[in-house]
Image (cartoon, coloured by chain):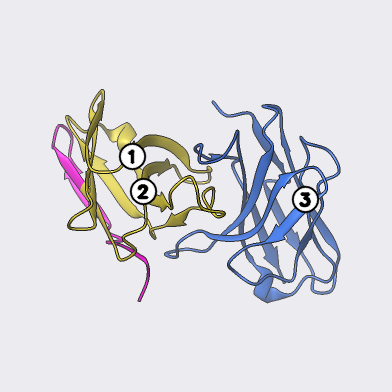
Chain colours: A yellow, B blue
Amino acid sequence: QKEVEQDPGPLSVPEGAIVSLNCTYSNSAFQYFMWYRQYSRKGPELLMYTYSSGNKEDGRFTAQVDKSSKYISLFIRDSQPSDSATYLCAMRLGINTGTASKLTFGTGTRLQVTL
Amino acid sequence: EADIYQTPRYLVIGTGKKITLECSQTMGHDKMYWYQQDPGMELHLIHYSYGVNSTEKGDLSSESTVSRIRTEHFPLTLESARPSHTSQYLCASSAGQGTPLHFGNGTRLTVT
């Protein structure tokens, strides 16, 4: 069983829709949670970076972490065609562990926002 | 945008050839990483470095080797390329313990 599970999609939504992307994980020691966006033929770029449970908002993007359920989400409001990309969730252990900088990734969800 | 550069972007090469994938960053980051990414699969860490003259193997076994002679440079070498090495290789760096990773745009390697 993978440590991080993510629905690969593809997910197709009309412009202006609210998008919900999700990941579940099995390791309760994960403390830091990230969402990366990867356009075709590009490297992943960091979108959101959160610690522990709660919400974090940045413009049209909201990251949500529920550690009790081992579940994280990324919401995109008023989705645009430029949001079409693959979204990768990633997480890592606490800062005091020797492997704190190593990330465990989901497989990515491919999102297509249509006009 | 992160200042991390990978060359070449695309490489098609025959079996048995020696190749070096270049990665450079201008941010002065101590930590650098190589990930392998295949379609529909999660990124897997194959090598990392916490500073000059420090290199470690990652979670995914790889026949490649790396070196870290300078802070800004973290090349990956395959002594004898095989078709099983066909993949996308992503280089990343981070500033310190627990800080986010910044990725380059990758090298897509095809071994024929």
Are the residues at dot 1 and dot 3 in contact (C-beta closer than 8 Å)?
Answer: no
Residue shown at the point (53%, 40%) measured from the top left: B101
- Exactly how many numbered labels are in the figure? 3
In the rendered image, residue A105, in percent from the top left (x then y), is placed at: 43, 56
Quick check: is B29 in the magenta stretch?
no
A11, above or below A26, in the image:
above
SS under mark 1: strand
| Mark 3 belongs to chain | B
B74, above or below B15, in the image:
above
- In depth, the one of A53 and A18 nearer the eye is A53
In the rendered image, residue A111, in percent from the top left (x then y), is placed at: 29, 48
Mark number displayed over residue A51: 1
Crowding around mark 3 (Cα neighbors within 10 Å: few <14, some 14 to 19, many 20+) is few
| Residue occupied by mark 3 | B54
Residue shown at the point (40%, 41%) measured from the top left: A37
| Mark 1 belongs to chain | A
